[in-house]
């Protein structure tokens, strides 16, 4: 069984964010023999190459726009994620309720 790691981005992995630009290749670097990578985007696509690189680097990429916090939490729970990393924290578009 592989470890399932999820990355939650309230800003949707948009090119305009420092986190997306600096971590764009991080997702594809996980050891796929031991880790499965899930990315959860809180905003619709901005059409950027940065977001596309991130999407391709994940085993599963989910756009969460239009979902309420309960639906998002259920989606993540349904994916069986073992570790969820909040990439937004207490900034614009934060989704801390999901982490509770």
Image: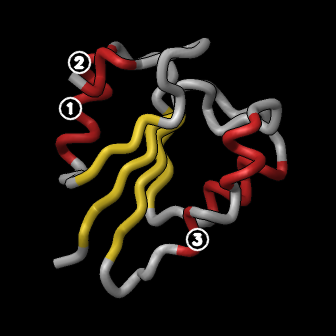
Answer with mark 2 or mark 3, whichever residue precedes in sequence. 3
Total numbered circles: 3
How far apart in space, not on screen, are marks 2 and 1 (Cα)?
6 Å
Left or right of 49 in this view: 11: left
Image coordinates for residue 14, horizontal then vertical, percent: 73, 35
Q: State the mark number for residue 70.
A: 2
Judge the density around disc 1: few (<14), some (14-19), many (≥20) Cα neighbours within 10 Å: few
Name the residue carrying label 3.
28
Image coordinates for residue 57, horizontal then vertical, percent: 59, 66
Above or below, 23 relative to 57 = above
Instruction: Please tell me which residue is depicted at 18% across the width and 41% down the height of the picture.
Output: 77
Left or right of 54 in this view: 61: left
Answer with mark 1 or mark 3, whichever residue precedes in sequence. 3
Secondary-structure class at tag 1: helix
Instruction: Please tell me which residue is depicted at 32% across the width and 44% down the height of the picture.
Output: 84
Secondary-structure class at tag 3: helix
Q: Quadrant of residue 53?
A: bottom right
Instruction: Please tell me which residue is depicted at 34% across the width and 13% down the height of the picture.
Output: 68
How far apart in space, not on screen, are marks 2 and 3 (Cα)?
28 Å
Foreground label between 2 and 3:
3
- Contact, mark 2 vs mark 3 (Cβ under 8 Å): no
The N terminus lies in quadrant: bottom left
How far apart in space, not on screen, are marks 1 and 3 (Cα)?
25 Å
Image coordinates for residue 49, horizontal then vertical, percent: 83, 51
- Contact, mark 2 vs mark 1 (Cβ under 8 Å): yes
Above or below, 89 relative to 9 = above
The C terminus lies in quadrant: top left
Q: State the mark number for residue 74.
A: 1
Q: Quadrant of residue 74?
A: top left
Instruction: Please tell me which residue is depicted at 50% across the width and 51% down the height of the picture.
Output: 61
Above or below, 72 relative to 56 = above
Left or right of 66 in this view: 80: left
């Amino acid at each position: 069984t592989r470890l399932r790691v999820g990355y939650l981005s309230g800003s949707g992995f948009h090119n305009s964010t420092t986190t997306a630009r600096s971590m764009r290749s991080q997702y594809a670097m996980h050891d796929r023999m031991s880790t499965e990578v899930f990315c959860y985007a809180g905003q619709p696509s901005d059409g950027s190459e940065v977001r596309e690189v991130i999407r391709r680097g994940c085993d599963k990429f989910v756009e969460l726009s239009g979902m309420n916090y309960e639906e998002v939490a259920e989606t993540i729970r349904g994916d069986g994620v073992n570790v969820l990393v909040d990439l937004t924290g207490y900034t614009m578009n934060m989704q801390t309720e999901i982490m509770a």
